[in-house]
Image (cartoon, grey):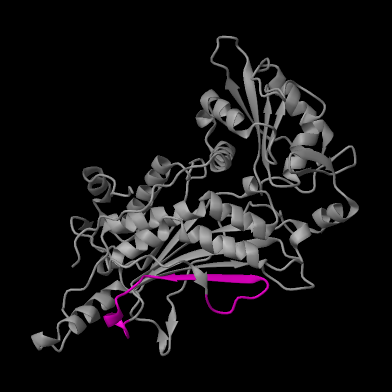
Amino acid sequence: MRPNLEIRYPPFARSTMMNVVSLIQALLHAAPTQVTMDRIRRLVKLVGPEAPTVEYKADMAQSIATAVAALANTYGGLVLVGVSDRRVITGVKEKTIEAVAEHCHSKIEPPWVPDIVPVPMDDGSGRFVLVLRVVPGLTPRPMLVDGAAPIRSHSTTHPASRQQLAALFAENDVRAQADPWSIQRPDIPVGAGGTDERVDLVLRSGLNIAVDPRAAWRPLGEQHADRLAQALSHSPLPAVLSALVSTGADCRPFERRGHNRSRVIRLYWQAPAPDRTRGLPVPVEASLTAEVPGGYGHQATHLRVHLDVTTRLANWDALREAEWQPVSGRTEPPAEQWLMSIEALELVMDAMISALVDERVVGALAGLAFVDALTIAQPRVLHMVTSRPIPQVLDTRGLTQIPGAGNSTGVHVLADPGLDLADPEQRHGQVRSWLIQTALDAGLLGMEQRLRDRPRPTAAG
């Protein structure tokens, strides 16, 4: 059994853009008590002029309903009432809450009122900043104001064109980033004789990105695909995966592999291995698929992105040891199989999510979908599928099996949408929560204590 790994990768530097994206997402979904003046000040400072998903109103104004409807008809977002266009936070009187709610209900067709979170200012003025939250997927579409359907384009609001209005009315459901939960579970890869029994586990996360109607018929450009491959290659993921096999070889970049089509991009990475391991299965591989479903003549609505990591380390270690020790006379591989440590799994999960919130990756995906990067939601789903029961794949020493709990060969976990996954500490907390859920679903107790007793695995450059 391989000892715990110390995995090192370059530190992830958060950019202003990723700060804005994660703050908007967190404020959209956080509990009202977590919407604080500190977070509002930080967002206003970082956003600067209004963004595609943020709009300011200094006080009660007749344009508030238009702002709300425009966000609902596009990507969702926040209207901050009590913040001027010059980004001065002045607040509003408490009675403004009722006025805003009545105004939206009377002006918007069909009648609708956004979630209004009044945040008291901390200067003793008794005034509030009203955070109007337009959550994608939870609003009727289209929304009309005075007979027109306003939409957001970059940082401006204007009435939808006839074509845009027809597309809104033709929707069967909400065309929003609003379904980030619909990432399907992966399958164990299939080999020549059927399911690949050498696989230990497959991890999957991903994104579901609404495609701008202007890009509905456009093929996925080579330039953006190349940018995406380069961005993934410079993310923490390759270094973390390379450390699992400890070959000491340089990390390879992601490259196109398989049948890439005009509407499908497949990028592939595999762990580097010494020459003498030729003939062994690929020990660790990662792949990213970005697909606009449908074809020409069928309007696309979403860019589906799946990021998968597959390991075959149990069999690879056994075969490698047998091959590297021919003088021992051993004809059978060692009985003890490699098990992935909890610490290694934690770092792989963290690196996958880190890659999906990396500014360069998000920017390349936004180029493929022809949308502003600020409108792309954070990943919300992680799947793990194992070829054998989890205790036969992970090193679960120190955990206690619940009698009669049965076996588990996978887990489906969801991210707290109120967390900022671009923040290393909040992402770390989310991943540890997933590990606890993984253990419980496998009928194992003691993961919480194990994580409390062990520091965060080394991930510094």
Decide: is 26 above or below 384.
above
Find the residue positioned furthest to the left: 328
Apparent side of residue 429 relative to residue 453 in the rendered image (left or right): right
Q: Residue at x 60, y 57 (%)?
A: 364
Magenta-drawn segment = 257-280
Report the front residue among 384 and 320. Answer: 320
Question: Which image quarter: residue 302?
Answer: bottom right
Question: Which image quarter: residue 139?
Answer: top right
Q: Residue at x 79, y 28 (%)?
A: 103
Image position, residue 407 (x, y; %): 31, 68
Whether residue 68 is in magenta: the answer is no
Regarding residue 452, the answer to whether it shows in the image is yes
Image position, residue 83 (x, y; %): 67, 23
Image position, residue 453 (x, y; %): 21, 44
Decide: is 357 above or below 268.
above
Decide: is 16 above or below 257.
above
Image position, residue 88 (x, y; %): 66, 20
Question: Which image quarter: residue 367?
Answer: bottom right
Apparent side of residue 185 relative to residue 243 in the rendered image (left or right): right
Badge count: 0
Report the front residue among 14 and 309. Answer: 14
Q: Residue at x 82, y 26 (%)?
A: 62
Apparent side of residue 332 relative to residue 106 in the rendered image (left or right): left
Report the front residue among 117 and 287. Answer: 287
Find the residue positioned furthest to the top: 124
Whether residue 262 is in magenta: the answer is yes
Q: Quadrant of the N terminus?
A: bottom left
Regarding residue 406, the answer to whether it shows in the image is no
